[in-house]
Amino acid sequence: MDEKIFNSSLLNFRDVTSARLLEAQQLSPRVTIAISWLLIIRSDEASQVDRKYLRESLGITSLIKLWGPYDVTRLLQLRADRPESFVRRKDDASQYQEQYPDKIRSFQVLDLNIHEISLYSSTYRANLSNSLSRKDKARGSGWFLVGQMNNLKAVCESAFERETGWLKNIADFLALSKPQIKAVFEALAQEEVCPVLIYGPHTSLILCLLLSLQGVAEDKISREYLLTEQNSDALPKYDNAYRKEFGLAAKTSYDHPQSFVPDVLDHINAEYRGVHVYLSSIGLTNNQLESVKKNLQEPANSNEKLVDVEEQYRFGEKYCRTSALVYTRASFSRYF
């Protein structure tokens, strides 16, 4: 493909060989090949075999999981399914509270550094809830009281899609989830972070911020973003399986904003006077930003690659994007 000439160190999973896919499928079920070009890794559940594959076969040193410490789509089920995500309150031992209210968690498993960070901050979620009309809230409350959770989810999804455009959604993340975005860049500023796999909702936003920080031209950032969009027709089959699980109607297609990169950068330039100013405003120091750039530009092994795939976030908002990206020094050296 002609697009590959632009950045030969970028591999979409559409280009990964069948042998690699078969090799990955031999891992535990928690490393899942959903469709032929899509790899999703549940770092909190992966076995030692999975992690050995990540570290030794793919050469990955760090994982940044943008799902956060838990899957935000299953908040109502966490007490039953993931009790470790909750701890007893100090002031009332009979009550529970979220163990990671800031949606940030870092730990090490074997020799992998794992950072779980969700952009769905408490402030963002509260703002999203407030955006619902009184009529939608009343309808949702009614379904909740009679235990019709599928209808509740359908009402919320419809309301969010109607009230929240994709650019406003991105603007809200930038404004309301600053600690979480800061945590992503703090992780990328650490020594020996590359190669790093970043995956989960809104990886496209992180990619846009990273490449812009590096000084990559807007048209090249757009090209990287659009490389994945040509696979969007394969998404409904995978996504609808999850939508059925959550009681949501199947989708036949998705509306992917072709102007994502220029619109996001225009918003950042107008609201914050540029990506560097924005990242500085959320508490990142110049030394940290320089460390991020240095980590992604240092000499790398010839087999390091940038793997970029996307799936549609499976619940709720139409404009939530899920990507899996492997950022390596070799990948970014191609831009300069």
Image: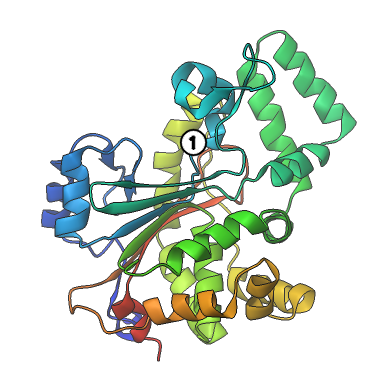
Total marks in image:
1
Q: Is residue 310 above or below residue 51?
A: below
Q: Is residue 315 visible?
A: yes
Q: Which residue is mark 1?
A: 70
Above or below for 318 versus 73: below
Quadrant where the image shows the N terminus: bottom left
Q: Residue furthest right?
A: 134
Residue reaching furthest bottom?
A: 336
**Location of residue 9 (image quadrant):** bottom left
Q: Secondary structure at mark 1?
A: loop
Label 1 Cα crowd, 10 Å radius (few <14 / some 14-19 / many 20+): many
Which of the image's four quarters has the C terminus? bottom left
Q: Quadrant of residue 134?
A: top right
Q: Is residue 188 left or right of residue 251?
A: left
Q: Position of residue 226 (x, y in %)?
A: 47, 70
Q: Residue furthest front?
A: 90
Residue in the image at 76% along x and 23% along y:
140
* Amino acid on which the number 1 mark rests in the picture: Tyr
- Between 88 and 323, the residue placed more toward the observer is 88
Closer to us: 56 or 217: 56
Residue 241 spot, x, y in % from top left: 42, 32
Q: Is residue 63 left or right of residue 81?
A: left
Picture residue at 10% right of the left edge, 55% below the top: 19
Scheme of colours in the image: rainbow
Outermost residue on the top side: it is: 146
Image coordinates of residue 198 in percent, x first then y, are 41, 58
Is residue 161 something that shows in the picture? no
* Residue that appears at 70% across and 36% down: 158
Does residue 298 sit above or below 140 in this rendering?
Answer: below
Q: As drawn, is 154 to the left or to the right of 247?
A: right
Nearer to me, 103 or 245: 103
Residue 238, picture quadrant: top left
